[in-house]
Amino acid sequence: MNTVSVPTVTLIGAGPGDPELLTLKAIKALRRATVALVDDLVQPGVLRYLRRSARVVPVGKRGGCASTPQAFIHRLMIQEAQRGETVVRIKGGDPFVFGRGAEEADALRDAGITVDVISGLTAGIAGPAAMGVPVTDRRYTRGVALVTGHAGPAADEPDWAALVHSRLTLVIYMGTQRLADIVQALRAAGMNADTPAALISHAHTPQQKEAVCTLASLAHTAAQQRIASPAIIVVGDVVKASPAWQAMLNVDAPVTSAQQA
Ligand SMILES: C[S@@+](CC[C@H](N)C(=O)[O-])C[C@H]1O[C@@H](n2cnc3c(N)ncnc32)[C@H](O)[C@@H]1O
């Protein structure tokens, strides 16, 4: 019997950086691939799991830099899959968290291509964890909201007032270039200037940088510590659980006469 294989593309979440955070399923898919379309937040170590003969196509889309049009990426994945290649699309973090994974899956399915999705650790959870910020610590919050800080059409702006009212931990992706605006929006919605906040850039890579501060000092802290994209901003009391917050309190605490003795 003649079996005709259905063209398939695998969307792989590569996690925030460190290749050791890849899932076993992701590694198996990387080993099978003959063509890999790769986002620019994917660390080079991840590509070591590809066969030597695999063709690697960088299709980065970093804000402010030269970017690959989304329609081009769709076309390329479809063409390669239809030619019989084993195609993987490697994305930073998780493909379905601010990763356009769903748009790509729709385009592929519309072209009659089967889509496999392999989840990855998202930067908004694994990033804060790398600095000891547990985003849903029940001692401080009832949950977390993952939001984009990227400026889009007005309708896309998060409802900052509703978010402040929810008292959820706020994890903000793509927000470092708009820090002042975001802080102003949260303050205007009634959030306390002293609310704990954290910044972490290049999480789980050798370039990782992090800082804790308050909502009011977020923009100043990012500038002073040179924390820039890709970075996650966390706003909420869960930051108090981190060693960095505890250390800051200890530095700021007045030295008591008992300690001096
Ligand atoms: C287009 S979104 C992709 C998010 C990705 N799909 C995920 O689940 O993590 C890019 C944004 O993710 C965040 N990001 C990705 N990798 C990061 C990392 N290693 N450290 C800190 N933030 C990161 C930054 O906010 C960056 O601007």
Image (cartoon, rainbow, N blue to C red):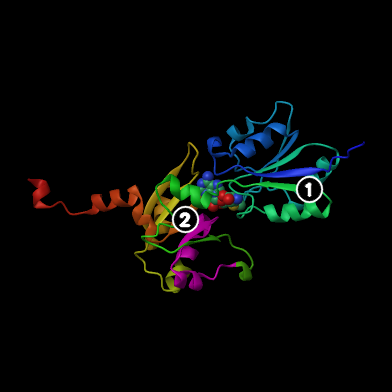
Q: Residue 58 appears at what percent x and percent y?
A: 69, 39
Between 190 and 152, the one lying in front of the other is 190
Left or right, 11 with reference to 163: right
Crowdedness near tag 2: few (<14), some (14–19) or many (≥20) residues, C-alpha within 10 Å: many
Residue at 62 percent across and 47 percent down: it is 119
Q: Residue 167 appears at what percent x and percent y?
A: 43, 68
Residue at 41 percent across and 58 percent down: it is 218
Q: Which residue is mark 1?
A: 114
Left or right, 151 with reference to 199: right
Residue 238 falls within the magenta-colored stretch: no
Disc 1 secondary structure class: strand
| Separation of marks 1 and 2 at Cα, in angstroms | 35 Å
Crowdedness near tag 1: few (<14), some (14–19) or many (≥20) residues, C-alpha within 10 Å: some
Q: Is residue 25 above or below residue 196?
A: above
Residue at 75 percent across and 44 percent down: it is 9
Give the farthest residue toward the right.
1
Asked if residue 138 shows in the view, the reply is: yes
> In the drawing, what numbered circle is on residue 205?
none
Residue 180 falls within the magenta-colored stretch: yes
On-image quarter of the C terminus: top left
Amino acid beneath label 1: Thr
Q: Is residue 185 above or below residue 121?
A: below
Q: Is residue 85 above or below residue 143?
A: above
Q: Which residue is mark 2?
A: 233
Disc 2 secondary structure class: strand
Does the residue tagged 2 have its C-beta within 8 Å of any atom of ligand 1? yes
The residue stretch that appears in magenta? 157-183
Residue at 64 percent across and 33 percent down: it is 47
Amino acid beneath label 2: Ile
